[in-house]
Amino acid sequence: MAIAYAIRRRRLRRNAVQRTFRCRFMSESMCEREFRERYRFSLINIQFILNLIRPSLITMTRRSKAVSPLLQLLVALRYFATGSFFRLIGDSVGLSEATVSRCVHRVATALCGIGRRYISFPTDRQLLKTKQEFYNLSRFPNVVGCVDCTHIRIQGPTANEKDFVNRKGFHSLNVQMTCDAKFHITSCVAKWPGSVHDSRIFRDSQLCSSFENGTYDGLLLGDSGYPCRHFLMTPYGNPVSNEQRQFNNSLCRARTTVEQTFGILKRRFACLSLCLRVSPTKAALITVACAVLHNLALELNENLDCVNDQNTCNGNADVANHVHYVGPDGDGVRVEKSHL
C-alpha cells in the first residue's frame, strides 16, 4: 500500500502544472484624479488609512507572492466604490476571485476594528456644538441626532431566507444609523434582517438604552415609523393647526440630514446601493466598514462633486410618505408641545 501511494505521488508531481503569477497592479501608473475616481480617496489619504489598519493586513508568510497591505486596501476600496464582481476586480489587478474576496473581508474586518474611534455619539462640548448646528439648520432646539434605517440589498442567504425579505420584496439588511448636522455617522447597527421593523431595531439598540438611562441629554428626531418618546420626536400624522405644521416643518428640515447621509454614503460606496453578493455576516461587516470610511472621508475633506449639501424638504410631504405611524405616548406629547 505504501509503495503504491508513493508511485501515485511521483506521477502527480510529473504531471503537475507549474504555478504562474499574473502581473499585478502598479499604483504608480495612476494620477491623483484617477485615484479619486476609482477609490474615492487620494493617494495621500489612502496611505493614511493604510497606516491605521496595516497591522491587520500584514500576512505572516515567507512566500514571495503575498499580497501587500496596500494592494489589499486598494482592492477593497475598488469593490466598495463599484460593487463589481470579485472576478472582474481580480482581473484588473492580477488576482484571483478567491483572493479578492479574502482581501475585501480582511480590510472590512480591520476597518470595523477601528470603528469605535470614528463612529461615536457626541458627548460634552461636542454635544453642545451638535445642538447648536441643528438649531441653526432647522430652529429645532436640543437636537443631538437624527435616526433612521436604510435597506442594504444582499443576495438571498441559504439559512432563514424568508427573514431577509423586506416589505419591498427583495433580500436586505435593515441598517440603523444616526447622524449629526454635518452628515457624520454617529452610530451604526447592521445586524438585522430586512423584515425587521425600524422601531424594533431602535428599541433593542444600545442607543435607545442610553437615552432611557439618561446618558445623553437631548432629543433624537425620527420619522413616523418610530414611537414618540420623551427623547425621540416624530412628526404629527395629521397636523390640524399652524403650530403642528410648523413643528413638522422644523422637524423635517433637521431630519433630512439622515436621508442625505444615506444618499452620500451610497453614492460614495456604490456597493451599498447595488447588491452585496456575500453572506449576511460579511455584508454587515462591509456596511460598517463603509460607514467608517464615510466619516474618514469627511474628516479628510474627500468630497464628491455630485453631493448637494442643501437641506430642503417639504414637511407635509414627508409626513404623508410614512404610512406606519405610531402615535406618541404621553411624555412625547408634552415634549412636543413645549417645542411648538
Image (spheres, helix red, strand yellow):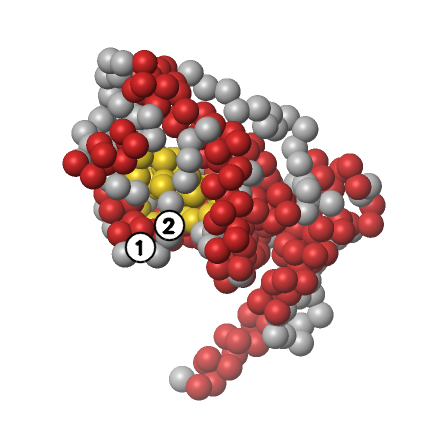
- Disc 2 secondary structure class: loop
- Disc 1 secondary structure class: loop
Q: Residue furthest front?
A: 338
At x 36%, y 40%, the residue is 220
125 over 218 or under it: above or below: below
Image quadrant holding the N terminus, namely: bottom left
Does residue 213 appear in this view?
Answer: yes
231 over 64 or under it: above or below: above
Q: Which mark is residue 214?
A: 1
At x 26%, y 52%, the residue is 212
106 over 180 or under it: above or below: below
Name the residue carrying label 2.
Answer: 217
Image quadrant holding the C terminus, namely: top left
Provide residue 84's location: percent of width, then percent of height: 55, 38
Instruction: Check contact, mark 2 vs mark 1: CB within 8 A.
Output: yes
Looking at the rendered structure, the kind of residue marked 1 is: Gly
CA gap, disc 2 and disc 1: 7 Å
Provide residue 324's location: percent of width, then percent of height: 22, 26
Looking at the rendered structure, the kind of residue marked 2 is: Asp
Q: Is residue 164 left or right of residue 132?
A: left
Mark 2 residue crowding within 10 angstroms, few (<14) / some (14–19) / many (20+): some
At x 61%, y 49%, the residue is 296
Provide residue 28's location: percent of width, then percent of height: 82, 50
